[in-house]
Amino acid sequence: TSKHNGVLRAAQNAIRARSVGSIILGDKEKPEVTRHLNDTSVTDICELGGDFATMRDVHYEVKCWNPLIKSTTSGRGSWDKGGNVASVGHLYGFGKTLDKALTAVVGCKERGRQVDGPLDHSRLERDGSKTT
């Protein structure tokens, strides 16, 4: 998209300003351009030898999320027990988009203890701290 390409150009300019190595832009239409750097996916930007300590390549991935999505519910929350992050996004920073973004980018593994059940938002203060 044009938003994604704009972010890539800005990031490329910022990286180039301090880079000592070459910078390669990935291209989904031509995955062979970066296949030798990452054979599992097309990298957005790669700075060859960009890690000053190890001289290893540094890969950058850009995601552009729409803050105006309707809703997404990746967790096991329920309306009876206070919902989950997506259902109360107006109370928490990035509440409507962060859950979907994290799930898409890094996946989602179970957290907490099974005996605790889903998060009960009624037990949280407005600042996010737990009440006793």
Image (tube, rainbow, N blue to C red):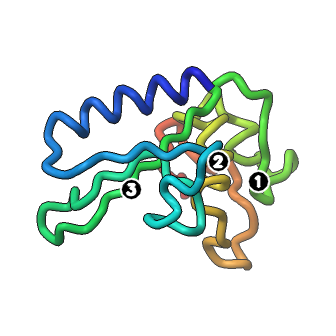
**Which residue corresponds to mark 3?**
59
Q: Residues within 10 Å of mark 1 (few under 14, many from 20)?
A: few
Q: Position of residue 124 (x, y in %)?
A: 58, 47
Judged left or right of residue 36, residue 76 is: right
Quarter of the image containing the N terminus?
A: top right
Q: Which mark is residue 36?
A: none
Is label 2 in a helix, a strand or a loop?
helix
Q: Is residue 66 above or below residue 52?
A: above
Q: Which residue is at the front of the view, 112 or 14?
A: 14
Q: Are marks 2 and 1 in contact (CB under 8 Å)?
A: yes
* Disc 2 to disc 3, C-alpha distance: 23 Å
Judged left or right of residue 47, residue 122 is: right
Q: Is residue 46 above or below residue 86?
A: below
The type of residue carrying mark 3 is His
Residue 103: quarter of image: bottom right
- Residue plotted at (75% across, 68% down): 117
* Disc 2 to disc 1, C-alpha distance: 7 Å
The type of residue carrying mark 2 is Asp
Q: Residues within 10 Å of mark 3 (few under 14, many from 20)?
A: some
Q: Earlier in the sequence, mark 2 or mark 1?
A: 1
Q: Position of residue 116 (x, y in %)?
A: 69, 72
Q: Which mark is residue 99?
A: 2
Residue 50: quarter of image: bottom left
Is label 1 in a helix, a strand or a loop?
loop
Q: Position of residue 54 (x, y in %)?
A: 17, 71
**Which residue corresponds to mark 1?**
74
The type of residue carrying mark 1 is Ser
Q: Earlier in the sequence, mark 2 or mark 3?
A: 3
Quarter of the image containing the C terminus?
A: bottom right
Is label 3 in a helix, a strand or a loop?
strand
